[in-house]
Image (cartoon, helix red, strand yellow):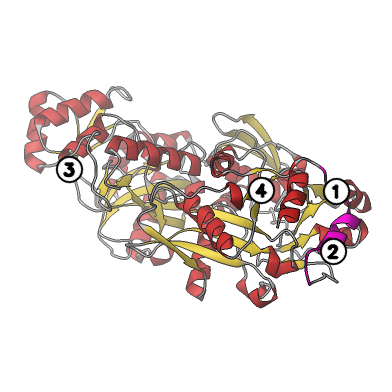
Amino acid sequence: MQKSQAYGQRLLRGQAPSYERLQARLAVDGQHETTEPLVLQCGWGRLLIGHTFPDASSLAEELLAEQPGERDIALYVAAPQQVLAYAPQQLFLDPSDTLRLWFSDYRPARRTFRGFNIRRVQSPADWQSVNRLYLSRSMLQVDPEKLTPRAEGGPVYWLAEDSDSGQALGTVMGLNHQEAFHDPEHGSSLWCLAVDPQCQRPGVGEALVRHLIEHYQSRGLTYLDLSVLHDNKQAKALYAKLGFRNLPTFAVKCRNSINQPLFLGPGPQAGLNPYAKIIVDEALRRGIDVQVDDPVTGLCTLSHGGRRIRCRESLSDLTSAVSMTLCQDKQLTHQCLQRIGLSLPAQQLAGSAEDNAAFLAEHGRIVVKPVDGEQGQGVAVDLRSPEQVEQAIAAARQFDSRVLLESFHEGQDLRILVIGFEVVAAAIRHPAEVIGDGRHRIGELIETQSRRRQAATHGESRIPVDEETRRTLADAGYDYESVLPAGERLTVRRTANLHTGGSLEDVTTRLHPELAAAAVRAARALDIPVVGLDLLVQAADRPDYVFIEANERAGLANHEPQPTAERFIDLLFPLSQPQHS
């Protein structure tokens, strides 16, 4: 063991061995000898253990055998320049960093991770959960039928599950190097860590990493390696906290459409928000020319076959100024949809305190919102006193001098996306909430959850610490300083907007036909080709609804895995054909 650790320490100091020395090392201190290069199928592609290959040319040849739709990785490549020399047009040096944790440096967690448990992936339902998590993080999905069997040293996948709901919160893949290739260093590695971007349980990612460390530590192994993108600061901060250090080794991959940004560098989509980027990515995939006019606002020009269309995210030249106005002005939206007989809340403009109080008295509970507003700004929900109403009106006037009063209706917040007068996606939007641990103040829980939502949505979603959040807490009998009991869920915003910390649940496949029909009727009445329509419903599979508003610049990225960007580009460039890799 001392000899093995000394060898590993030489690696950490940068004394990278040659292929020949690495292969020779495999025969030292062990009863086994690797006679064939090691290739492990992980379900999303293959891991090629570089130092088990006899020379650079054989490793390059194996990499070039990568199958379409998969991603192969050659790790522990001591002399990457030799491998790249055999196929410089097809192979590239992966910019990821390799990190190593020696188990002798590991210190167990001081805190307890509550609210979830970790177990091995076993059933078809488990694999569906794993792939849902990978899809939510834009990662390749796993085909369990392709996996190298565990008996032959194949990988093991783990799943973190919510203790209450049973929902999958995170997943990770581990590889025992001793079982895979009789590693004389007695090591292991971690791959494909993913946590649900809507996860509300703290510490899931850290717990999965620690679980893998302690699992392999108990098996008598000595270290855990992992590969992380060089610019993934959040992940690197976690690994540094756990004691990982840089390992001077290299990884080589094939050039393909999956990892194109890694070898081409920043493209036209660099700096775009997720709502513009998803459109640009789809356009580039189809060979459509993209000119980014203003990355901050998401303004782009797309050109193909003599056709030129400007877009600001999902708002394009195809939307007329009149249709855009009908959506922006919530009073005009209400009038337009009322004429075609859709179910709508009562509505009037805020006026004198007496008029506002009379509207409240008539309906009991009301909503206040600016006439022209977006992203949930200035919206106050379920107001029950004249004082609350007047405070909310003053807050809404920061976004528009005109303020609307609407009758409040109970129900789930449903967003239906209509493109080309067809329903493409539907999602229930859940308000931001936190889960107590019996130790942290609600203000701290909100800060932690907000930070997690920002990281998961590239800064698009966060929970505002404002009067609306304070009022929501007060109505539940809490304030920012209160300590929420362990396991208790608390809604901290009444509006379910993504930009104020809300989360989405895809319900496209179970959307009731009457809800879909109402959405299409609304889009036709507004005469708008792309629109996000908000309704309050009892459930996605029930026909009852109350129409709330229309969004002329709906976020397509919010509805993955539905093909929103594909349908949007189909609308803009119907003659374009997807290019398959």
| Residue name at image x 41 percent, y 49 percent | 523
SS for tag 4? strand
| Residue name at image x 56 percent, y 48 percent | 106
Q: Amino acid type of disc 3?
A: Ala
Task: Bin the neighbour count of mark 1 within 10 Å (Cα to Cα): few under 14, some 14-19, many 20 and up.
Answer: many
Q: Which portion, as a residue range, is magenta?
A: 15-31
Which quadrant of the figure has residue 15? Answer: top right
Nearer-N-terminus badge (4/2): 2
Asked if the residue under mark 2 is in contact with the one under mark 3, i.e. CB atoms within 8 Å, the reply is no
Nearer-N-terminus badge (3/1): 1
Measure the alpha-carbon separation of dots 3 and 4: 46 Å
Is residue 98 shown above or below 186? above
The label nearer to you, 1 versus 4, is 4
Q: Amino acid type of disc 2?
A: Glu
Q: Which residue is mark 2?
A: 62
Q: Position of residue 390 (x, y in %)?
A: 16, 26
Is residue 19 shown above or below 455? below
Q: Which residue is mark 1?
A: 80
Measure the alpha-carbon separation of dots 4 and 2: 26 Å
| Residue name at image x 70 percent, y 58 percent | 1
Q: Position of residue 434 (x, y in %)?
A: 31, 46
Measure the alpha-carbon separation of dots 3 and 1: 60 Å
The label nearer to you, 3 versus 4, is 4
Q: Nearer the viewer, residue 501 or 482?
A: 482
The label nearer to you, 1 versus 2, is 1
SS for tag 2? helix
Nearer-N-terminus badge (3/4): 4
Q: Which residue is mark 4?
A: 100
